[in-house]
Amino acid sequence: MIDVPSTPSPASATPGLIDFGGFLTPALGGPVQRVERMGTRFSLSVVMPPMINTSTGRIWIARLIRGKQEGIRMPWPLQGFDPGSPGNPLVNGAGQSGRTLIADGFTPNYIAREGQFFSIEVAGQHYMHMVAGESLANASGQMTLSIEPMLRVAPTDNAVLHFGQPMIEGFVMGDQLQWEMALANFVGLSFDVVEIE
């Protein structure tokens, strides 16, 4: 897994939800049913600001080319959202599944905001999730989170939850990776990253 540079930040980013669920529409007019399937995950379409080729541009290009085969890991853009001081949150108990996650290690009385993104690190791999409803840590730093999408892997006990800076991890998608070589030695590039699982 290739870590892309932490700077510069994307000029713009377009998150997406890849939904593996579906709808069953009866042919004879009955009610439409939603069928849930595990595997729903996130994608991120990124446009980088112009970068000087002799310094940052060439490094980004090299890492994205490697990321086509090996995958990349990069910070999820927070767009001015301040996650505050979450503490050192961890998964509290192995074998969890579904849309609820029991955690501890939060700063006492920390509030996880609805729509706040975080990643769960399991065996070195990050899985993006979103807080589906506001939750409050108790005085011991324990919290039960309502999350979307549902867990796609069972996190281990004490798996790290990245609330301060969530990370998206996946492959650089598309048939080809292109970049612009502009005047004054600037490089412009854009790419899509899709979670592996």
Image (tube, rainbow, N blue to C red):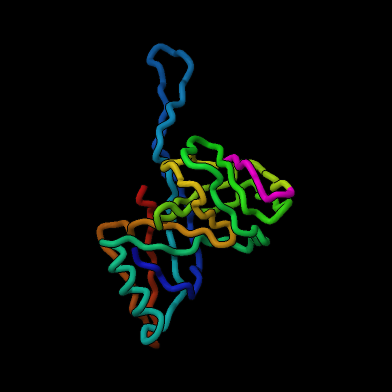
Residues 137 and 43: in front is 137
Residue plotted at (49% across, 38% down):
96
Q: Quadrant of residue 92?
A: top right
Q: Which residues are magenta?
A: 139-146
Residue 112, image x, y percentages:
65, 50
Question: Does residue 140 show up magenta in the picture?
Answer: yes
Q: Identify whether 186 is placed above or below 105.
A: below
Residue 108, image x, y percentages:
72, 53
Residues 161 and 148: in front is 161
Q: Is residue 12 left or right of residue 57?
A: right
Residue 12 appears in view? yes
Q: Is residue 54 left or right of residue 144?
A: left
Residue 81, image x, y percentages:
64, 60
Q: Quadrant of the N terminus?
A: bottom left
Question: Does residue 180 show up magenta in the picture?
Answer: no
Residue plotted at (43% across, 52% down):
122
